[in-house]
Image: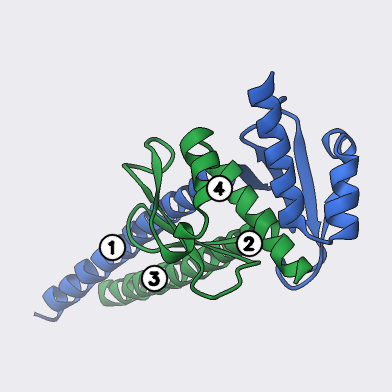
Chain colours: A blue, B green
């Protein structure tokens, strides 16, 4: 009788392990789907694909980029949102010196800078 | 001897359940942290806080908004990225009719619209 009880316990525990592992798997799938949905929404709305390249470093690619490697790199000093965020030099950023000077150095606004870049790239697409 | 073996099995299974549950908990924490990091990066860089309000509906609040309820609502028809995305009318969107006409209706570009809104709100902040 005791042996039978132990068997039932074991079967329950085994089920619990399987159930927890299945939950893990589903959680990962939900996570992937949610973050993908958010990244896509961000891209469709703001026009920037944001990729986290290494810790605290973000690569932005505009939906209106003329070349695939026209990307902007930003590095956060410390946790994002609490410290400052700096533009790293790339070939593409060097081609935007006037906007860098005005919006980043003078106005100190990354959103204004990225907005100006979007409008500039969009106008290049439609005026060619 | 058999009884002792069963006990070991049960202890192992119980450990496996606990370990899987702990993994679930950690997965949730990592998920929350990752999505929060991405949302913050999106906000700091593009200037828009993006909230998913209901399925396929996105509320955007600019870092330069003059009032807390100056928000823009977009609704995706179908899965985001595959269908079209439409601006829903809000008090704030009604106040941006010229930009809506030019960038959404004429140019059909949400990124250009949101960029123009950012630059307009930013200029209002700095010129007052």
Query: Residue at left 77%, top 67%?
Result: B127
**Residue B5 in view, yes or no:** yes
Q: Quadrant of the N terminus of chain A?
A: bottom left
The chain identifier of the residue carrying mark 1 reads A
Marks 3 and 2, Cα distance to the nearest angstrom? 46 Å
Cα distance, mark 3 to mark 4? 64 Å
Label 3 vs 4, first from the N-terminus? 3
Return the residue nearer the eye: A106 or B58. Answer: A106
Q: Is residue B1 left or right of residue B39?
A: left
* Residue A114, horizontal then vertical, whole percent: 72, 48
Same-chain status of marks 3 and 1: no
- Residue B15 vs B117, above or below: the answer is below
The residue beneath circle 3 is B12
Check if mark 2 and mark 4 are on a common chain: yes
Q: Nearer the viewer, mark 2 or mark 4?
A: 4
Q: Residue at x 90, y 37 (%)?
A: A94
Q: Can see residue A42? A: no
Which residue, given by chain and number where applicable, does mark 2 sit on? B43
- Residue lying furthest bottom: A2
Residue B22 is drawn in which quadrant?
bottom left
Q: Which mark is residue B99?
A: 4
Identify which residue, A96 or A27, lies in the foreground: A96
- Asked if disc 2 and disc 4 are in contact, CB closer than 8 Å, the reply is no
Q: Position of residue A97 (x, y in %)?
A: 90, 41
């Amino acid at each position: 009788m005791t042996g039978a009880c132990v068997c039932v316990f074991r079967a329950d525990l085994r089920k619990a392990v399987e159930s927890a592992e299945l939950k893990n798997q589903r959680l990962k799938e939900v996570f992937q789907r949610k973050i993908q949905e958010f990244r896509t929404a961000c891209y469709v709305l703001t026009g920037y694909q944001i990729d986290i390249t290494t810790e605290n470093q973000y690569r932005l690619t505009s939906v209106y980029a003329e070349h695939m490697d026209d990307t902007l790199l930003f590095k956060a000093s410390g946790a994002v949102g609490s410290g400052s965020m700096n533009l790293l030099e790339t070939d593409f950023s060097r081609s935007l010196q006037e906007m860098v000077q005005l919006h980043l150095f003078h106005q100190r606004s990354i959103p204004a800078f990225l907005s100006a870049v979007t409008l500039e790239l969009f106008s290049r697409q439609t005026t060619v």
